[in-house]
Image (cartoon, rainbow, N blue to C red):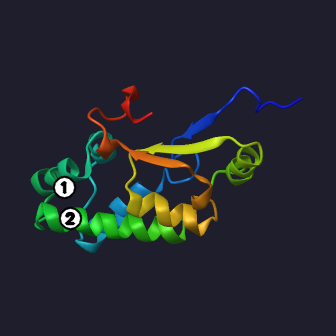
Amino acid sequence: MNIFKDFDCVIFDFDGTLVDSIGVWKDIDIKFMAKRSLPIPDDFYAKVSVLNLWQAAEYVIDECGVTDSPEDIVAEWLAMSEYEYANNIEMIKGAKEFIFKLKENGIKICLATAAGESQYKPCLEHHGVYDMFDAFVTTNEVKRKKGYPDVY
């Protein structure tokens, strides 16, 4: 039985679906705040989890005592995340094998993600699957963000 016969394309999300990156942002926040000897407020993760990077930068300036510019904060967070994605983030168990199985069956593979190319590309290259994808779309390329079907 070929379970793939009815599929022309599979669209994957990235974080938490293909790669085990859920804890990376919390680790980045901890390192970022520790570098400045600042405590992390109790409600920090609840507040920043719904913000984009620029909004989160404004939050840490306004509420946490960070004195860097928003541009410097975002640049530091991106550099930290890019390093983690390129070197330390593992694929979800079975994801790589599933991608190869899809390609063996002639199915196109697409990535729809809120992650930037500077995060997903080195990670997928590191794991040897980047070239298996036929298309990439980020939420920065569509009008509405996740929660709406635009990115898919």
**Residue 111, horizontal then vertical, whole percent:** 51, 45
Report, in whole angstroms, how far the alpha carbon at label 2 lies from the one at label 1: 6 Å
Q: Against 54, is 110 above or below?
A: above
At 55% across and 49% down in the image, what residue appears?
134
- Can residue 38 be seen from the camera position used here? no
At 51% across and 54% down in the image, what residue appears?
21
Which type of secondary structure does the marked residue at label 2 adopt? helix
Which of 148 and 39 lies nearest the eye of the viewer?
148
**Residue 43, horizontal then vertical, whole percent:** 28, 43
Q: Is residue 27 left or right of residue 20?
A: left
Q: Quadrant of the C terminus?
A: top left
Q: Is residue 112 left or right of residue 130?
A: left
Q: Which mark is residue 121?
A: none
Mark 1 — residue?
A: 57
Q: Is residue 26 left or right of residue 103?
A: left
Which of 7 and 146 lies nearest the eye of the viewer?
7
Is the residue marked by circle 2 packed among few (<14), some (14-19), or many (20+) residues within 10 Å? many
Q: Quadrant of residue 145?
A: top left
Q: Quadrant of the N terminus?
A: top right
Question: What amino acid type should be assigned to the residue bearing mark 2?
Answer: Ile
Q: Which mark is residue 73?
A: 2
Q: Quadrant of residue 131?
A: bottom right
Which type of secondary structure does the marked residue at label 1 adopt? helix
**Residue 99, horizontal then vertical, whole percent:** 68, 49
Question: What amino acid type should be assigned to the residue bearing mark 1?
Answer: Ala
Q: Against 145, is 115 above or below?
A: below
**Residue 16, horizontal then vertical, whole percent:** 54, 45
Query: In this figure, what is the number of numbered marks?
Result: 2
Residues at marks 2 and 1 touching, judged by CB atoms closer than 8 Å: yes
At 37% across and 63% down in the image, what residue appears?
28
Q: Against 144, is 71 above or below?
A: below
Q: Is residue 5 left or right of residue 111?
A: right
